[in-house]
Each structure stands twice: as C-alpha cells, then as structure tokens.
Image (cartoon, grey):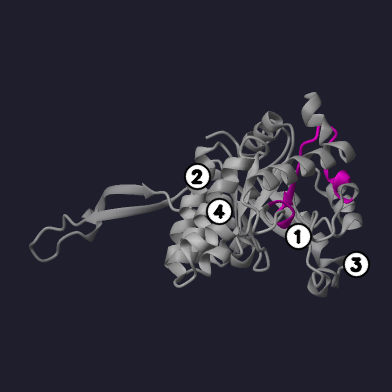
Amino acid sequence: MDHFADRLAAACRAKGNSVCVGLDPRWESLPDDIRHRHGSETLEAVARAYDEFCSRVIDVVAPLVPVVKPQSAFFEACGPSGMVALQRVLGKARQRGLITILDGKRNDIASTASAYADAGLGGVRIEDRESKIEEHRGGDPSSIHPRSSVLHAVWDADALTVNPYLGRDSVEPFLQSARRSGRGVFVLVRTSNPGAGQFQDLISDDRPVYVHVAEAVGQWTRENLAKCGLGDVGAVVGATYPAELQSLRKLIPQAPFLIPGFGAQGGAAKDVAEAFREDGLSAIIKSSRGIISSFSTSDPKWESAVEKATRETIALLIQNTPMVGLLRGE
C-alpha cells in the first residue's frame, strides 16, 4: 500500500478540497423516518438506525469530500450491535473510495497498545502453533514452530486518533502497525474543547506541554516522509485556538493536521487558514454537526440538506483558505 500521506494528498487533490465529514450519529438528531423505521426499543435497533443513517450520509458526501471520520463512542454506546454497525460503516466508506479516520483516541502500553493498533489499522494476525516435540521424554521444545498465520481485518481504518499521554513507548506500537500497513496516526496535541488548557497549557521547561507533544510529533513524522513531503504522524489541533494552530504549523511543517472545532464549535475559515501549505495540502478540516445535523429531523429530503451543507462548507474554505490550491493543482 502507498504511503498514507501520499494517499491522503491524492484523495484531497481528486476532490479539490480537504474536508472531513465526522460521522457522529446521535439518536435525537436522526431523521424521523429512520427513527420510526427502526425504533429505540433495543440497542440493536438503534445500532441499525446509526448504520443506515451513516451509510446514507456516506453516499451523499462520497462524491464531494475525501475523508470521513466515524466517532467510535457513539457506536460503542450501542454495545456489540454498535460495533457491527461501525464495521459496516467503515466498510461502506472504503467501498466509496473515502479515506477513513477512526476516532477512538486510543492508547496503552506494550501488547495492549499493539492490539488497539492492529485492530484499528492493518489487522490482527493470529498464529497457530503445532508441536512436533517427540513423544519420548526429553523432547526438544525448540521444535515447536509456526504452522500458519492468518491476518484478520477488524476496523481496517486508514488512520487512528491516539492519545500520547503515556509517552513514546505507548505510541510506538501504533507507529509500527501503521507503517507495516501504509496507514497513519493522528496524535492529540492542542484539542478544541474549552478545558484543553488545564493540562495542555501547563509550563514545563519554559514551554507549554502541548508544544512538547508537538515537538515529539514532528520528530515521529520525520521518520517516515512521503513523496508529498508530509509524514504518517499527524497532529490533532483545534480550530478554536487559531494562534496556537498557526505557531504549531510553523513548528511542525511536515505533520498533517486534523482540525476539529470548525463550524458548530465556533472555528471559522479564517481560523484554520494558517494550517495549510500554499498548495492546499497538510490540513484536514473536520465538520460533523454542521453537516450531518444540518436539517430538520422531520424533513423527508434531509439528504439534500446534507449535500447543501457539505458544498457550502467546501466553498467557504476554498474562498478563505489556501485550500483553493487543490483546485488549481498547485
């Protein structure tokens, strides 16, 4: 598989924008016809409703945008059926040629981190072992050898969001899994929530903690640069902190940015403009509620509203940011 950053760049150039539609299904925001058809008597029914809604959103936005980002929490809230729905939604997005970012903000250490990473990205390899130890006493244990192994795809996303709080040894399994399979990792650096500064703004060695994290991301992404000049380790940087976003872009120019907080959370096009290179690459602008909740739940033509909101988001960003470079082929 080609380098993640090159695949991401190609997808953005093909669509002429770098908008990411967040798939965050909320029961109360679903169209009435979907809620009435499935009902809410069981979590299995709710999961089926989420599956249908997200699948139909994907059909609307796939011709328009390069990336979708399912938020795993909403699917997990439906239990096992929600996990099945999430897998189906990711599969649908892949079938429609979209880059997928699974938003789970995972992390742990050692084998646990590896399990998270392999499940999210390139797949879980299960190895059978056959003993050929001689039956007589004193058989040689070294004769146990791998018989076969099978690689099982699980979520099969193109990228994952990762929490770096545990340090490099906790991120390393995600980097290894991503690089084995041509995938990417987006590390939380400067998040869009109002309380982000409680820890991220703490000063250590004369710099805020989020700057230390960004410097680590810059080092990790330079380890594996693509032809487009970007690496496979990106930074999650909120649109709600435009000054920090600008300084971080200068600090880590080779890291792709995943930028939440645009639209419904208050981030404007001018706030994200400095995240882009002149050619329109290096920033993925995520919009969720502004697109997938852009309609009245009673509107039977809600898909038209989703399409309209998607087109308006793209146009706004093209008019006010270097994203226009993607249209010019710079």
Q: Nearer the viewer, residue 167 or 242?
A: 242
Q: Earlier along the polypeptide chain: callout 3 or callout 4? A: 4
Q: Which mark is residue 189?
A: 1
Name, please, the residue furthest toward the top.
329
Tag 2 secondary structure: helix
Label 3, label 4: how far apart the Cα atoms are: 48 Å
Q: Which mark is residue 37?
A: none
Q: Pointer 2: residues within 10 angstroms few (<14), some, or many (20+)?
A: some
Does 90 sit above or below residue 96?
below
Q: Earlier along the polypeptide chain: callout 2 or callout 4? A: 4
Look at label 3 and name its amino acid. Asp
Of marks 2 and 3, the one in the foreground: 2
Residues rendered magenta in the picture: 271-291
Q: Residue 296 in the image: x percent, y percent?
A: 69, 57
Label 2 close to label 4 by CB (< 8 Å): no
Question: Quadrant of residue 244 in the image?
Answer: bottom right
Tag 4 secondary structure: helix
| Residue that numbered label 3 is attached to | 206
Look at label 2 and name its amino acid. Lys
Label 1 close to label 2 by CB (< 8 Å): no
| Residue that numbered label 2 is attached to | 92
Q: Residue 44 in the image: x percent, y percent?
A: 43, 66
Name, please, the residue furthest toward the left.
136
Q: Earlier along the polypeptide chain: callout 1 or callout 2? A: 2
Label 2, label 4: how far apart the Cα atoms are: 12 Å
Of marks 3 and 4, the one in the foreground: 4
Label 1, label 2: how far apart the Cα atoms are: 30 Å
Of marks 1 and 3, the one in the foreground: 1
Q: Earlier along the polypeptide chain: callout 1 or callout 4? A: 4
Q: Quadrant of the C terminus?
A: top right
